Image (cartoon, rainbow, N blue to C red):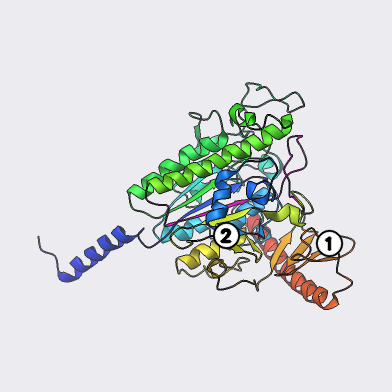
Amino acid sequence: MKFPVKILSVIALAIFTQATQGADRPNIILCMTDDQGWGDVGYNEHPYLKTPHLDQMHAEGVTFTRFYAGAAMCSPTRGSCYTGRNPYRYGITFAMKGMLEPSEVSITSVLKKQGYTTGHFGKWHLGTLSKEPGDQKRWGTFAKSPARYYCPPWERDVDVSFVTESKVPTWDPLIDPGPIKKGGSPSSGKPYGNDYFSGPGQKVTENTKGDDSRVIMDRALPFIRNAVKEEKPFFTVIWFHTPHSPVVGGPKYREMYSDRTEHEQHYYACLTAMDKQIGRLRAELESMGAADNTMLWFCSDNGPARQGSPRHVGTAKDLKGYKLSINEGGIRVPGLMVWPEKIKEPKTVVAPCFTSDYFPTILDTLDVDLPAGRTYDGVSLLPFVTGKKTERKKPLGFLNKDGKEAAWMEHRYKLIEGKKTPQLFDIIADPGESKNLAGKKPEVMQRLHLGLKAWKGEVMAELKATEANRKALGL
């Protein structure tokens, strides 16, 4: 059968496009830990913790010395990764409160249109995974209205999922470790109460014993291998539960810290076990010939926890504050990126960057415009990574869990309002936020105050519109 030349041209173009789809587009992997502090890595001079593979990323790629989570706690930060926007704009203001709204344009939706295959592995925490009351260990709005907040990744343009709704133990993730007290935590043998889902009503129980980070990576690697085999660019989210409570370390990893206290052993053990999976991921990418063209990112979702468990021994090093605080210790986290094809020698970025920057950076890499009709809080980090820029012009905004406290951060200065007395810090000279300059820098105070006031008003207006839209839809 003979085809007209025009049809043959269309067929040839389609074949060419399919064959070259992954050739000039980087693969993208976003790795994130849960409650890992700024000081909880070897390369930031932790005195005991061993993280050789993160240290290697630091030695080979880009280290962001001022990398920030989008918020001081889990769910809001995770939403910022998917949208490039502040969590208050779309209603994820606290854990198990709000969801990744259908009106939001997610990074997975954009990349699907660019020919990417998408996967999400580990923690989700952007909505419920089932509509059944009592089906998972929930509290807050998720417990009251699981159907209302049903928002699984497979309904947000994620092709392959292996996810939990929220936290699980860091060892034997589906088994309740029992009460964590001074004498240890022998397993209760009972189900923990949160499940791994791979699709609607599809709970996964096989190969879920041992280190939770390994369980997650066991699902992520086949997805990556299949994408490489099919010559498709891939976008992979790998969100570890480590070192969020329940903190349980495996025996062989605890043995590495036998000279430390019981609680330290467990905390350090689960982080070292996670670090091993980072090394495993990088080795697999290398063996598949995919390492050079893969942009691999790593960060934490907020600072270290200091409540709920004696095993929360994480550190923000010399920074002030912990999880839930918009002081540096609550939001500044380890930040790394390797991309061998583009980053051929180690680099340090000193400008403030945060998780809302992922979205515009990825699209900038692909030379794709940001979706219109919405305000983005992030900027592309490519100019900083390539050395074309060293100082950030667009400030970073943060709100605490109830929105009463807010921070506005320029390249050098950071303003915190909402407490009894406004606080102004020179973060470059005083990262520990020990000297309040509010009375000494009136011009800086005025500039940051006006900027924060305008930004917060805009963000709160969007939150109000989001909540009104939910109500109008009967959600």
Q: Residue at coordinates 57% horizontally, 42% vertically from top-left?
A: 275
Q: In the rendered structure, which disc, 2 or 1, sits on the residue that comes first in sequence?
A: 2
What is the chief secondary structure element of the magenta stretch?
loop
In the rendering, which numbered label is found on residue 62? none
Q: Nearer the viewer, residue 123 or 297?
A: 297
Tag 2 near tag 1, CB within 8 Å: no
Which residue is most to the left? 1
Q: From which residue to which does the magenta span run?
A: 289-317
Q: Sort mark 2 into few (<14), some (14-19) or many (20+) by Cα contacts within 10 Å.
A: many
The quarter holding residue 473 reads bottom right
Helix, strand, or loop for circle 1?
loop
The quarter holding residue 435 reads bottom right
Q: Sort mark 1 into few (<14), some (14-19) or many (20+) by Cα contacts within 10 Å.
A: some
Amino acid type for the residue under numbered disc 1: Gly
Disc count in the image?
2
Q: Nearer the viewer, residue 98 or 336?
A: 336
Residue pointed to by mark 2: 83
Q: Quadrant of the N terminus?
A: bottom left
Q: Position of residue 376 (x, y in %)?
A: 60, 67
Q: Position of residue 191 (x, y in %)?
A: 61, 26
Helix, strand, or loop for circle 2?
helix
Verify whether residue 325 appears in magenta. no
Q: Position of residue 140 (x, y in %)?
A: 71, 43
Vertical comparison of 463 with 448: above or below: above
Going by the image, does 237 lie left or right of 234? Answer: right
Vertical comparison of 444 with 365: above or below: below
State the CA–CA distance, disc 2 to disc 1: 26 Å
Residue pointed to by mark 1: 418
Verify whether residue 299 appears in magenta. yes
Amino acid type for the residue under numbered disc 2: Thr
Q: Position of residue 89 (x, y in %)?
A: 66, 61
